Image (spheres, rainbow, N blue to C red):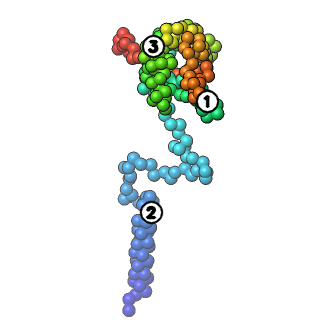
Amino acid sequence: MYPIWQVMLGLFGLVAICMGGVLSAACNDHPGVASSGPQAAVSTSPVSTLAPTPTVAGTPSVAAQATPTRTPTLPPRPLTGRTETFAIVPEESMLTYTITQVLLDEGGRTEQVVGRTRQLAGQFALNYDDPRNSGFGMITANLNTLTSDNPERDEALRSNWLEFARFPLAYFLVREVRNFPPDFQPAKPLDFQLVGDLTLKGVTRPTTWDTTAALYLDRLKGTATTRINLADFGIPLPLVPGLIEVTDGVTVTLEYTFKMIQPPPLPGGT
């Protein structure tokens, strides 16, 4: 028989061993819990161990609410105190004519004839301080390249009625800018009128174009629309007796993109 004190000491030792095993297992299951003893390891990881801030259901976190980086809408240099030259981009622009024809052999049914061309050219110098005083060059369109959904009609327009083969180019020269809004801002569409001279088949007449324009970075985009009468330019109305007649009044629409021409470097390379 062992003395009673030895038996008690052995029991205490067994309990201590068991408790140590339980604590060790708990630490392994929860690695974020640090030991308070002198052998506790110090974390060197840069990642924060703080728990994330709880969020209300349906409310995005602060990171999710961060405003995305926006593409600037201003040209790369200050707007005031200068002008900048822009040239039309043919592949991003289009001139369209719309005219109404009456189909006599179909009981007088009317239909819209639409022709288009991208053969455009022209420049202007935008005055940022006062866009009304911008300088405009001649804007030209090659009417001989107008096409519609009917090649035979297009050939007749070129050869006979409108004689595009003899007078291929239409010219428009801006003389005045009217009703330009005072609060010119980049990327904000503005409505105004361009007044000038339109030349067709060698005949020049004053025309007014209702215009919408907006400046995006290095591009000026918009539309300009006018309505003309062919008789004002000495152009006879197309007519196929018993089959087709055309009502006078042609809507002309220019969907345009002008691109800023890269300016020369400023002194000092800025």
Question: Which residue corresponds to mark 3?
Answer: 167
1 or 2: mark nearer the eye: 1
1 or 3: mark nearer the eye: 1
Question: Which residue corresponds to mark 2?
Answer: 30
Front residue of 28 and 220? 220
Residue at position x 55%, y 50% in the image: 53
- Compared with residue 148, is residue 235 higher up or lower down, i.e. above or below? above
Given the current orientation, which residue lies at the most extreme front position?
A: 242
Comes first in the chain, label 1 or label 3: 1
Q: Amino acid at mark 3?
A: Phe
The local secondary structure at tag 1 comes to helix
Horizontal and vertical percent position of residue 38: 38, 58
- Compared with residue 114, is residue 21 higher up or lower down, i.e. above or below? below
Report which quarter residue 91 is drawn in: top left
Front residue of 78 and 182? 182
- Compared with residue 17, is residue 210 higher up or lower down, i.e. above or below? above
Comes first in the chain, label 1 or label 2: 2
Residue at position x 61%, y 34% in the image: 106
Horizontal and vertical percent position of residue 259: 44, 20
Q: Amino acid at mark 2?
A: His
